Amino acid sequence: MKMKMSWMGLVLGLVLLMAVSSDAGPFGPNQPVNCCFKFDTSKIPESEILEIVKTDSHCPVPGY
């Protein structure tokens, strides 16, 4: 019985180590990180615009 508990502890420890050191995240490798889900439709003065960035083609809503 003591030997089974040692093996179980070793296996659980290795699984925990693999999970902690994994590169897995909430998104898959081909998923965009920066998507816009809400857009402002009001007119913005050109002098206030500092940068325009097109959203990724994989985003559910196109940026422009």
Image: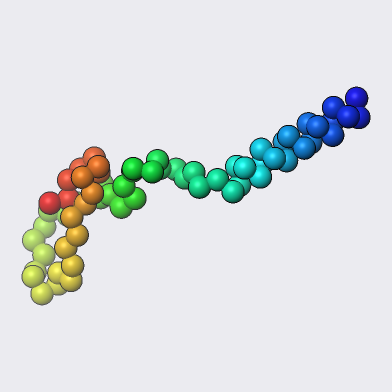
Judging depth in this view, the residue of 21 and 53 nearest the camera is 21
Q: Residue at x 16, y 63 (%)?
A: 52
Instruction: Specify the quadrant that holds the N terminus.
Output: top right
Tally the numbered discs.
0
Q: Quadrant of residue 18?
A: top right
Q: Where does the image place residue 39, in percent across and percent down from the top left?
A: 19, 51
The answer to whether residue 4 is above or below residue 61 is above
Q: Where does the image place residue 56, in percent across and percent down from the top left?
A: 23, 49
Q: Where does the image place residue 60, in percent across and percent down from the top left?
A: 24, 40
| Residue lying farthest to the top in this orientation | 1
The colour scheme of the drawn protein is rainbow
Q: Where does the image place residue 55, in percent across and percent down from the top left?
A: 21, 52
| Residue lying farthest to the bottom in this orientation | 47
Q: Residue 31, can we see it?
A: yes
Judging depth in this view, the residue of 3 and 42 nearest the camera is 3
| Residue lying farthest to the right in this orientation | 2
Q: Residue at x 72, y 36 (%)?
A: 12
Q: Residue at x 10, y 74 (%)?
A: 47
Judging depth in this view, the residue of 30 and 52 nearest the camera is 30
User: Relative to residue 13, is residue 28 drawn left or right?
Assistant: left
Q: Quadrant of residue 30?
A: top left
Q: Residue 38, can we see it?
A: no
User: Relative to residue 55, is residue 64 drawn left or right?
Assistant: left
Judging depth in this view, the residue of 46 and 54 nearest the camera is 54
Q: Residue at x 85, y 27 (%)?
A: 4
